[in-house]
Image: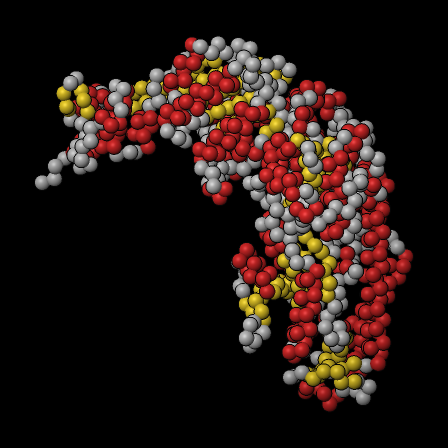
């Protein structure tokens, strides 16, 4: 279908000036199109703008910051209206897609100047967050998954499909595990069955599984899934896929939806993978948030995430592959050994690694180029980029010949596709245009018919240019010129002072203020030939382009194989680069219950601190002897950092990366649980403590002997004794002989819990070391054996700048509480009175304590003066 987005504004204005009836017909046309796409924001082409009307205009103006105007302002109820320039459409559409909205694009199907009455229009594209394939709408380093679910009585089927890369992931899970699985996947759009298509009980369970997920409501709930059989276009179903019928039903729903919005060409050459949760280290959404794997906490910077410091990949497919490895670390020891061996090979080959990474720079995204080829969405520039990428493949393959087999590409994946490269090189110009309908994309000599049309069109233009010289000589009008516009075509323009010289064969076409325009029979004849040749030339080039795209689509499996090999090599070389740059080591992986990290570091915090400032710490856990580590010590002592660095080392190792430590031995972890940091979900009616308890309950219900549990301050969100009781019971439960007995690190300020080491044989105490210095403390950030004696909370408050009166009162209250007195027995003095503390049976002024803690020999004169000034402000009596 040929489109004309460059239609001139003048005919569009003429269309709008057609009177009241014309405007009514235009809005009737809009209403008819909108009725067919009620769930999408309709971008309606009018001349040089895409306009939105009615509720769409109100929504778009709010989301995009557009000025909301109105159409038919003289009417009692004007129509709300806003618009964007046609050449800026994609930027605005991308913003709407990121906000979760679908967009239907209604274009003009004929030049406005040639329309007889109302310009014909129709929807040419439907863009939804999970179905787009254009680079301008996608994150280059992340998959763009559309997810469909299908519920049965006992299981939930899940299909994840990335239309831009042709990847399809199928999974089936029990209802108990469904929330964890659904919350762990990053999804752009969900396709859900409407409640009327499933039993009410299943509908409620589906709602429960999706509760709290961002973006869980799709733009396209399906009234029915038309074909729940295995998708025939994907070939025979393998035995592993035959075991997941609900996932196959979800896949059928995915195809129904994608075919609906992409015109029946979606996922023609899909790469199908079955996901099994038993084969991966399961990291739920809460853990990913706590560890800041890909997204920083609110108010944080991108540099606070692991992804920011780990993604050293040179290509977009490499970045997506690395992200996939991090999102789903594995339990396969053989595959982990292969990944670590490949990283080791790249690490040892420093010069080869640098050369290969430099050769990857600027390589087009082969994976997404193949995806657009497969669904017939590739542009001329896409084909040009594919040609350039194929040209570079043999050189990349040659650079790998001296590396160990661990880095060798599989088979001939990187040998290139010489027949396709040759075809594209012969057919396309060096720099193809962005759109096929613009013409100018086929190289001279590729097609004889195209060359004849090109010669005819350009010889006609030369004739017209020569005509100007001839007519100037014939008429004696030196200012005569030949021009062109879309309405009148080619014309001869003569200024008014020379109108008396116009020959008799000139036919008047248009009168201007200072000139008149004419045509001649010969000019009209040649114009018809030129314009006809130009249109035929563009049509022929478009035909050739479609043929090229169809031929290229037959090579999609080979393009995907090359992209897959390059992505893997890019990831392994990038991980080696990170290991070399930051001094990471290869972990020893086994199936034991041990976890030993020597001088481990936090991969993010270490990068944010000045060089050499980070204090490394070791960790040792063993399900048989040292199962639970109870970690005490002050705030700011490094306990939370310690927990996170242990978790990140495990996650990195099982993703295939080296780890930030001096040495590491890691027994495989099947589930990683973290309860770190405070968060609430006020929108769901859940307080911080409720969120904490729900996450803790999930840990206690689903942890196994191979899990790693990291708890930070469980129980702090409620009354002291309630929190202590809960923390005590949780620790005992994790230690039970007949229980799961997962490897656990529990950071707490409840010092009473340290007594558990006397009665729980597999529990040991660690604490964050602190050095007292005068009236303050120095946090050493070292974890050492044994329990902490106190939490130094008042010292931390002093560092934070709390007023001296508050600190003094806090010391008094702490003294009373440590003397086993209750809050009811504390001194109830009026707020304005000076605080006092009991010292040796007397009531002394707070200055007595402060002076007792001072070391005069270490004070400078300036520090002494500052102290005196502070004391005067606090306790001095104004005159």
Could you say where residue 541 lies in the image, as x and y percent from the top left?
83, 57
At 78% across and 81% down in the image, what residue appears?
519
Locate residue 14, reporting x and y percent. Answer: 67, 76
Image height of 813 relative to 557, above or below: above
Q: Quadrant of residue 229?
A: top right
Q: How is the image coloured?
A: secondary structure
State left or right for residue 355 relative to residue 622: right
Q: Locate the C terminus and report the quarter of the image it occupies.
A: top left
Residue 799 location, x and y as percent?
32, 30
Residue occupying image coordinates x 68% and y 45% = 193
434 or 264: nearer the viewer: 264
Q: Residue at 82% x, 45% y: name it.
A: 552
Residue 84 % position (x, y): 60, 62
Viewer-nearest residue: 680 or 855 = 680
> In this image, 612 relative to 293: left or right?
left
Residue farthest toward the left in the current orientation of the protein: 879
Count all numbered tags in the image, as a single digit: 0
Is residue 279 visible in the rendered structure shown here? Answer: yes
Quarter of the image for the N terminus: give it. bottom right
Residue at the image point whose x is 64% and y is 78% from the top = 20
Closer to the camera in the image, 100 or 393: 100
Instruction: Name the outermost residue toward the right.
Output: 448
- Give above or below for 560 relative to 448: above
Residue 567 visible in rendering: no
Q: Residue furthest front?
A: 200
Q: Quadrant of residue 69?
A: bottom right
């Amino acid at each position: 279908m040929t489109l004309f987005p460059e239609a001139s504004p003048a005919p569009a204005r003429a269309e709008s000036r057609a009177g009241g009836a014309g405007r009514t017909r235009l809005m009737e046309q809009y209403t008819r199109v909108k009725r067919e796409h009620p769930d999408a924001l309709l971008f309606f082409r009018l001349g040089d703008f895409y306009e939105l009307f009615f509720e769409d205009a109100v929504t778009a103006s709010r989301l995009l910051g557009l000025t909301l105007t109105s159409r038919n302002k003289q009417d009692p109820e004007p129509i709300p209206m806003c618009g964007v320039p046609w050449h800026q459409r994609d930027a605005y559409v991308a913003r709407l897609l990121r906000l979760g909205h679908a967009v239907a694009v209604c274009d003009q199907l004929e030049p406005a100047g040639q329309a007889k009455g109302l310009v014909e229009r129709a929807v040419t594209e439907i863009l939804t967050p999970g179905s787009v394939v254009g680079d301008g709408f996608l994150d280059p380093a992340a998959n763009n998954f559309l997810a469909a679910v299908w519920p049965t009585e006992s299981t939930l089927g899940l299909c994840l499909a990335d239309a831009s890369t042709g990847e399809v992931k199928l999974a089936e899970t029990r209802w108990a595990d469904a929330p964890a699985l659904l919350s762990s996947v990053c999804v752009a759009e969900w396709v859900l069955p409407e409640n009327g298509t499933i039993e009410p009980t299943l509908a409620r369970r589906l709602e429960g599984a999706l509760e709290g997920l961002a973006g869980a409501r799709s733009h396209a709930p399906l009234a029915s899934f038309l074909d729940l059989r295995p998708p025939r276009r994907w070939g025979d179903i393998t035995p592993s896929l035959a075991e997941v019928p609900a996932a196959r039903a979800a896949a059928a729903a995915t195809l129904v939806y994608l075919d609906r919005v992409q015109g029946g060409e979606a996922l023609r050459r899909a790469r199908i993978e079955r996901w099994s949760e038993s084969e991966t280290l399961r990291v739920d959404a809460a853990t990913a948030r706590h560890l800041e794997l890909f997204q920083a906490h609110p108010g944080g910077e991108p540099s606070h995430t692991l992804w920011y410091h780990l993604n050293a990949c040179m290509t977009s497919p490499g970045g997506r592959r690395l992200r996939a490895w991090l999102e789903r670390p594995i339990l396969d020891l053989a595959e982990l050994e292969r990944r670590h061996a490949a990283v080791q090979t790249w690490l040892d080959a420093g010069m080869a690694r640098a050369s290969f990474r430099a050769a990857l720079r600027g390589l087009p995204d082969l994976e997404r180029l193949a995806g657009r080829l497969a669904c017939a969405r590739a542009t001329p520039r896409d084909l040009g980029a594919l040609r350039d990428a194929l040209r570079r493949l043999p050189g990349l393959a040659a650079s790998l010949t001296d590396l160990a087999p661990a880095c060798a590409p599989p088979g001939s994946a990187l040998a290139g596709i010489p027949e396709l490269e040759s075809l594209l090189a012969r057919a396309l110009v060096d720099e193809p245009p962005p759109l096929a309908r613009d013409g100018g994309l086929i190289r001279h000599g590729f097609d004889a018919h195209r060359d004849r049309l090109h010669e005819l069109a350009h010889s006609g233009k030369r004739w017209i240019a020569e005509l100007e010289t001839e007519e100037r000589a014939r008429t004696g009008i030196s200012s005569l010129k030949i021009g062109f516009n879309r309405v009148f075509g080619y014309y001869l323009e003569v200024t008014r002072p020379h109108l008396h010289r116009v020959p008799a064969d000139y036919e008047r076409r248009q009168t201007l203020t200072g000139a008149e325009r004419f045509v001649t029979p010969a000019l009209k004849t040649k114009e018809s030939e030129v314009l006809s040749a130009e249109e035929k030339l563009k049509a022929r080039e478009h035909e050739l382009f479609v043929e090229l795209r169809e031929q290229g689509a037959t090579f999609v499996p080979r393009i995907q194989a090359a992209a897959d090999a390059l992505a893997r090599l890019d990831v392994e070389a990038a991980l080696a680069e990170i290991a070399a740059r930051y001094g990471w080591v290869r972990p020893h992986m086994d199936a034991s219950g041990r976890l030993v990290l020597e001088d481990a570091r936090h991969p993010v915090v270490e990068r944010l601190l000045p060089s050499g400032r980070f204090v490394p710490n070791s960790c040792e856990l063993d399900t048989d002897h040292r199962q639970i580590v109870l970690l005490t010590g002050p705030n700011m002592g490094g306990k939370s950092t310690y927990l996170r660095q242990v978790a990140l080392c495990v996650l990195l190792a099982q993703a295939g990366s080296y780890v930030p430590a001096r040495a590491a031995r890691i027994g495989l972890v099947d589930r990683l649980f973290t309860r770190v940091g405070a968060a609430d979900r006020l929108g769901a009616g859940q307080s911080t403590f409720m969120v904490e308890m729900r996450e803790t309950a999930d840990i206690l219900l689903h942890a196994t002997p191979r899990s790693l549990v990291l708890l930070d301050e469980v129980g702090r969100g409620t009354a002291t004794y309630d929190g202590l009781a809960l923390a005590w019971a949780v620790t005992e439960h994790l230690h039970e002989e007949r229980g799961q007995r997962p490897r656990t690190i529990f950071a707490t300020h409840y010092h009473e819990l340290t007594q558990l080491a006397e009665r729980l044989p597999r529990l040991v105490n660690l604490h964050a070391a602190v050095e007292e210095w005068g009236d303050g403390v120095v946090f050493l950030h070292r974890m050492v054996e044994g329990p902490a004696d106190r939490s130094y909370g008042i010292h931390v408050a002093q560092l934070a700048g709390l007023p001296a009166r508050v600190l003094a009162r806090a010391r008094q209250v702490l003294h009373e509480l440590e003397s086993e007195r209750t809050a009811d027995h504390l001194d109830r003095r009026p707020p304005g009175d000076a605080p006092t503390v009991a010292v040796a049976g007397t009531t002394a002024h707070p200055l007595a304590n402060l002076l007792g803690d001072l070391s005069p020999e270490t004070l400078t004169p300036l520090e002494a003066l500052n102290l005196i000034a502070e004391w005067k402000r606090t306790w001095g009596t104004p005159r």
